[in-house]
Amino acid sequence: MIEKPTINTDRRIPPGRGWLALSPVIVFLLLYVMVSVILDDFYKMPIAVALVVASMWAVAIYRGHPLMERIETFSRAAGHFNILYMIWVFVLAGAFATIAKEIGAIDATVNLTLRFFPPEYVVPTMFFAACFISLSVGTSVGTVVALTPLAVEIAQMVEANTAFYVAVVLGGAFFGDNLSFISDTTIAATRSQGCNMADKFKANLWIALPAALVTLIAYIIMGQDTPPIQLAQESDYMLILPYIVVLATAIAGINVTIVLSLGILTAIIMGMVNGISLIDMASFAGAGIDGMGDLIIITLLAAGMLGLIKAAGGIQFLLQGLTSRISGRRGAQAILALLVGIVNLCTANNTVAIITVGGISRDIAERYGIDPRKSASLLDSASCVVQCLIPYGAQTLLATSLAGISPAAPFPYLYYPWALAAMIAMSIIFLFPRRLN
């Protein structure tokens, strides 16, 4: 359960202090994104190094507190329940992905998939599968864990760009995260705006479904150039059982840590049946956990830095700055989308961003006559756009870690979040769906 942030919107933060509080995010983006763009290589500047520098800057500028108190604030944010829970997911995901790969489960699943679908339809099929699974599971993280290893294996078989295939999975994962009835973002958005999930789902369909269809059509067109794939003649399809267990239990709504634990147990059993010793599988699991080391460090650094930004008044400054520039119904809707998007940029968690701005967003919606279903839809959709695009979001970090690529590598191929952003803008400009205006 995510702890609801407390924000006093009546407390005014001076511009100088507000921009200073937000400066660690600017330092990070300049170091990581700008340096990588200048060098034309997103592997040159490690994201962990950029976060270390930005975190040190965040500690330095948190004035009026002893050094140990600043470090304690940083550590408390990094050690929050949600962060440690996410690290458990990373550890289990790393162990499961590596064991499944080493026993041949990924190869068997890929071979079975390609026997049913022609090569030119693999990309749209993968996107559709990610949409369906995330809609059923209600978590983009679970979808990323299940499909990213398969996407990487297929990309290698067709000698395609791995980052592109990872981006396909990420886009589909956020489609379901945006619409699912059991997604924490949906729950946060509907509760904060005072509407029920079914009504918000219908409102969201006008934004998310057209974006997904446009993306799917683009993938169908792009997939026509996929070359024929030479499949292995023999493959033990019983090895796909770990993935069936993971998908079935996830769709059943079981907690993701239990889902991954059951997947690991099934993979170990299948490995032993095929003559792999228990000590070898322990080595596989250890290698997978070790491979998550960078991701865990990045997650802790980002959480601590963002905790200092919030404590210094950065989030408060954003809220008061954006809410003072509202004009008309369209302007109010645009501010709702910008508000949650920018806060998401600063928190790297779309659920926390929705909860943070939920109360003030409801006040704005009531003041300007915005239907709660529309405001909930805007909060959920806009936060998913930003969460999918930032290279330090948990989903992107996990997917790229499993794929062994830079966190920024999928960015040029993330078509779905841009299509979703375009639909959000159109829904504000043309005020649709009309029944909600």
Image (tube, helix red, strand yellow):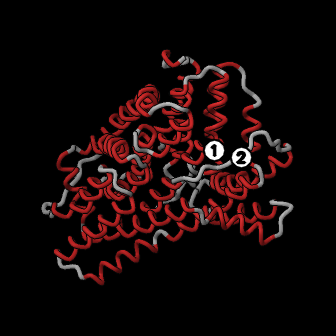
Q: Quadrant of residue 268?
A: bottom left
Q: For marks 1 and 2, give the one nearer the viewer.
A: 1
Q: Which amino acid type corresponds to the residue marked 1 in the rendered image? A: Thr
* Rendering coords of residue 25 (x, y %): 70, 52
Residue 370 disc label: none
Q: 173 or 313: nearer the eye?
A: 313
The residue tagged 1 is: 356
Q: Tell me, yes or no, if residue 324 can be seen here.
A: yes
Q: Tell me, yes or no, if residue 101 can be seen here.
A: no
* Rendering coords of residue 185 (x, y %): 50, 43
Q: Residue at x 46, y 74 (%)?
A: 290
Q: Residue at x 27, y 81 (%)?
A: 278
Q: Quadrant of residue 82?
A: bottom right
Q: Is residue 137 left or right of residue 21?
A: left
Secondary element at image label 1: helix
In the picture shown, does residue 60 fall above or below 127? below
Q: Residue at x 58, y 57 (%)?
A: 42
Q: Residue at x 32, y 53 (%)?
A: 250
Please identify the residue farthest to the left as the structure is shown: 234
Q: Are marks 1 and 2 in contact (CB under 8 Å)?
A: yes
Q: Please count the marks in the image.
A: 2
* Rendering coords of residue 150 (x, y %): 32, 56
Secondary element at image label 2: helix
Q: Residues within 10 Å of mark 1 (few under 14, many from 20)?
A: many
Q: Residues within 10 Å of mark 2 (few under 14, many from 20)?
A: many
- Figure quadrant of the C terminus: top right
Q: Quadrant of residue 283?
A: bottom left
Q: 388 or 68: nearer the eye?
A: 68
Q: Is residue 258 left or right of residue 266?
A: right
The residue tagged 2 is: 315
Q: Which amino acid type corresponds to the residue marked 2 in the rendered image? A: Ile
